[in-house]
């Protein structure tokens, strides 16, 4: 899907999310790295890059970690970790392709 829609220039922005499937039509949000969920984020980002996507991307909602308090789903630290993870994957994929 990421490949098809990015090649057609139909993606305005990406809200990247990893999920863990827990049953038929059941899942819960998971941290971005692949080992925590069932989405191969590297493959998704590669499909976006190959398709020519160059728009904005944001991480998923953040968990409250490291003693943080706030509105559930909007943990600042975890969202920052997610953004950094996505940026690192993107940069790594660019370097794999010799686009640095």
Image: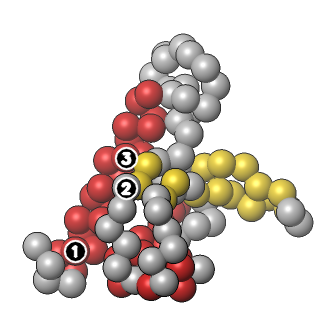
Question: In the picture, residue 73 is in which quadrant?
Answer: top right
Question: In the picture, residue 39 is in which quadrant?
Answer: bottom right
Q: Residue furthest right?
A: 24
Q: Position of residue 82 (x, y in %)?
A: 42, 46
Q: Name the secondary structure under disc 1.
A: helix
Which residue does the numbered mark 3 point to in the structure image?
83
Name the residue rendered at 24%, 69% in the picture.
92
Q: Determine whether label 2 and label 3 are within 8 Å by CB.
A: no
Q: How far, Cα to Cα, is label 2 from label 1? A: 16 Å
Q: How far, Cα to Cα, is label 3 from label 1? A: 17 Å
Q: Is residue 30 left or right of residue 67?
A: right
Name the residue rendered at 49%, 16% in the picture.
67
Quadrant position of the N terminus in the picture: bottom right
Q: Name the secondary structure under disc 3.
A: helix
Q: Which mark is residue 94?
A: 1
Q: Which mark is residue 56?
A: 2
Name the residue rendered at 55%, 29% in the picture.
74
Q: Residues within 10 Å of mark 2 (few under 14, many from 20)?
A: few
Dot placed on the residue nearer the N-terminal end, 2 or 1:
2
Q: Residues within 10 Å of mark 3 (few under 14, many from 20)?
A: some
């Amino acid at each position: 899907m990421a490949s098809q829609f990015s090649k057609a220039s139909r993606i305005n922005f990406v809200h990247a999310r990893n999920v863990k499937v827990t049953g038929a039509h059941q899942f819960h949000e998971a941290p971005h790295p692949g080992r925590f969920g069932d989405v191969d984020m590297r493959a998704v980002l590669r499909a976006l890059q190959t398709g020519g996507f160059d728009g904005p991307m944001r991480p998923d909602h953040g968990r409250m970690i490291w003693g943080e308090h706030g509105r559930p789903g909007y943990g600042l630290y975890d969202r920052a970790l997610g953004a950094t993870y996505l940026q690192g994957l993107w940069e790594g994929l660019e370097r794999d392709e010799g686009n640095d």
